[in-house]
């Protein structure tokens, strides 16, 4: 009996190790990227520090109570009763001169402003293992990586599964001019064309177009002068 239990534990451990070592999980920083992280003024004592106190739990229920509510609480109004109404324009025919905002669901959207195409947190596939944890609401799953036009800047705000989709990024990589992420995140493309950057701050009244263009150009993203993909 003990041998059977030991075999089950070993198999579960092996399956867990194989699961978390998929390429889609990325890897810990090393080499020059690790040194850049260590040189950040916000990195101290082995981890990044927020500039201001930022509690992870804002509920008075605490972590255990919040998790209990998520797992076993009421499911009422947690998802739409029917598919969300959606329009699907042909983004390949989107003129550069046209300012546009296309929302794909959650935090994924395409912003075209002042001739610059910016794609943020694209999660455009629903494949295992991501689908093991969550799936998009019906109506927010109509676009795919093939529907995206050439992109000047791809911005990944952070590396949670619902913001960074490995398959989407890999399918888009040949059509991306520049990728931008926070310096502490792992973007699993092996690209030298990714920039880890601090958050950009725009002063009130600077104008959205001027502000965004300053961000793009500061990161090497330009609609007229592109370095080209180097993934």
Image (tube, grey):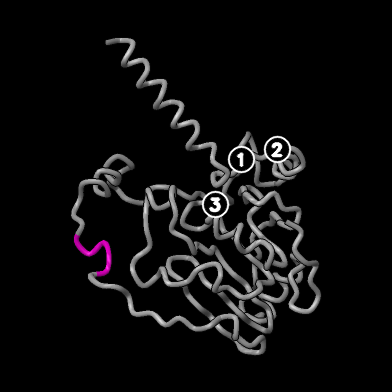
Q: Is residue 59 left or right of residue 147?
A: left
Residue 34 occupies quadrant: top right
Residue 39 occupies quadrant: top right
Q: Secondary structure at mark 2?
A: loop
The crowding category of the residue bearing disc 1, from other C-alpha atoms within 10 Å (few below 14, some 14 to 19, many at least 20), is some
Q: Nearer the viewer, residue 125 or 55?
A: 125
In this picture, which residue range is highlighted in magenta?
76-80
- The numbered mark, 2 or 3, whose residue comes first in the sequence reads 2
- In the figure, 8 relative to 25: above or below? above
Q: How many marks?
A: 3
Residue 207 seen: no
Residue at the disc numbered 2 = 30
Residue for point 79% across, 71% down:
226
Give the Cα distance between marks 1 and 2. Answer: 9 Å
Q: Which mark is residue 159?
A: 3
Residue 206 seen: yes
Asked whether the residues under the numbered discs 2 and 3 touch, taking CB atoms below 8 Å apart as contact, a structural biologist would say no
For the C terminus, the image quarter is: bottom right
Inspect the magenta stretch and tell me whether residue 53 lies in it. no
- Please tell me whether the stretch drawn in magenta is mainly helix, strand or loop: loop
Q: Secondary structure at mark 3?
A: loop
Q: Is residue 28 left or right of residue 89?
A: right
Q: Is residue 82 left or right of residue 32?
A: left
Residue at the disc numbered 1 = 27
Q: Nearer the viewer, mark 1 or mark 2?
A: 1
């Amino acid at each position: 009996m003990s041998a059977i239990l030991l075999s089950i534990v070993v198999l579960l451990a092996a399956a867990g190790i194989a699961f978390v070592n998929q390429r889609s999980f990325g890897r810990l920083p090393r080499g020059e990227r690790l040194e850049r992280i260590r040189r950040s003024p916000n990195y101290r004592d082995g981890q990044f520090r927020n500039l201001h106190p930022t509690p992870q739990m804002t509920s008075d229920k605490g972590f255990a109570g919040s998790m209990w509510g998520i797992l076993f609480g009421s499911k009422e109004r947690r998802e739409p009763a029917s598919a969300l109404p959606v329009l699907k324009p042909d983004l390949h025919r989107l003129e550069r001169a046209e300012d546009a905002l296309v929302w794909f669901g959650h935090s994924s959207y395409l912003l075209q402003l002042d001739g610059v195409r910016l794609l943020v947190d694209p999660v455009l596939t629903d494949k295992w293992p991501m689908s093991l944890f969550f799936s998009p609401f019906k109506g927010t799953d109509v676009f795919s990586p093939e529907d995206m036009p050439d992109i000047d800047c791809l911005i990944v705000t952070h590396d949670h599964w619902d913001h960074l989709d490995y398959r989407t990024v890999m399918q888009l990589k040949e059509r991306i001019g520049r990728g931008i992420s926070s310096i502490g995140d792992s973007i699993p493309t092996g690209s030298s064309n990714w920039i880890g950057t601090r958050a950009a701050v725009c002063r009130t009244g600077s104008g959205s177009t001027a502000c965004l263009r300053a961000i793009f150009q500061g990161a090497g993203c330009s609609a007229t002068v592109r370095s080209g993909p180097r993934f």
